[in-house]
Amino acid sequence: MSDKAEPNATLDPMSARPLYVQLADVVAGKIASGELAPDRPIPSENHLADEYGVARLTARRAAQELRERGLIVTVRGKGSFVVEKPPSDGPEESEPNA
């Protein structure tokens, strides 16, 4: 059992995409797969920084990106949590207008 990231979840520092966006995508994938359950905390910024080998500020920006996507909420003094119902990508789940 290792706390290291899976090989397919490594970040590419040479990519044109910022590291914080790559990290946010990795965490978003874990949320989508159910590995990070609704109403449960995500790993702390320090833990994400250590696990993925990035600066703490990069992990903080990734958390900000996830908040902007509507995937997590941050409670001051408690941490960041996966939202109960992530926003849908399409209108198929919304109520039809009469």
Image: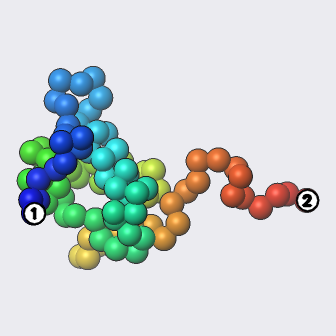
Which residue, given by chain and number where applicable, does mark 2 sit on?
98
Mark 1 or 2: in front is 1
How many other residues sit within 10 Å of disc 1, few (<14), some (14-19) or many (≥20)? Answer: few
Between the C-alphas of marks 1 and 2, the distance is: 54 Å
Q: Looking at the picture, how far across and down is residue 25, in whole percent? A: 34, 44
- Kindly indicate the quadrant of the structure image that contains residue 7: top left
Q: Nearer the viewer, residue 39 or 77?
A: 39
Q: Which mark is residue 1?
A: 1
Q: Nearer the viewer, residue 1 or 56?
A: 1
Q: Is residue 33 above or below residue 38?
A: above
Q: How is the image coloured?
A: rainbow
Amino acid at dot 1: Met
Q: Quadrant of the C terminus?
A: bottom right
Instruction: Residue at 31% x, 52% y: name it.
Output: 27
Q: Is residue 90 above or below residue 30?
A: above
How many other residues sit within 10 Å of disc 2, few (<14), some (14-19) or many (≥20)? Answer: few
- Say what secondary structure mark 2 lies in: loop
- Say what secondary structure mark 1 lies in: loop
Amino acid at dot 2: Ala
| Count of numbered tags | 2
Earlier-in-chain disc, 1 versus 2: 1
Q: Looking at the picture, how far across and down is residue 78, in whole percent? A: 26, 76
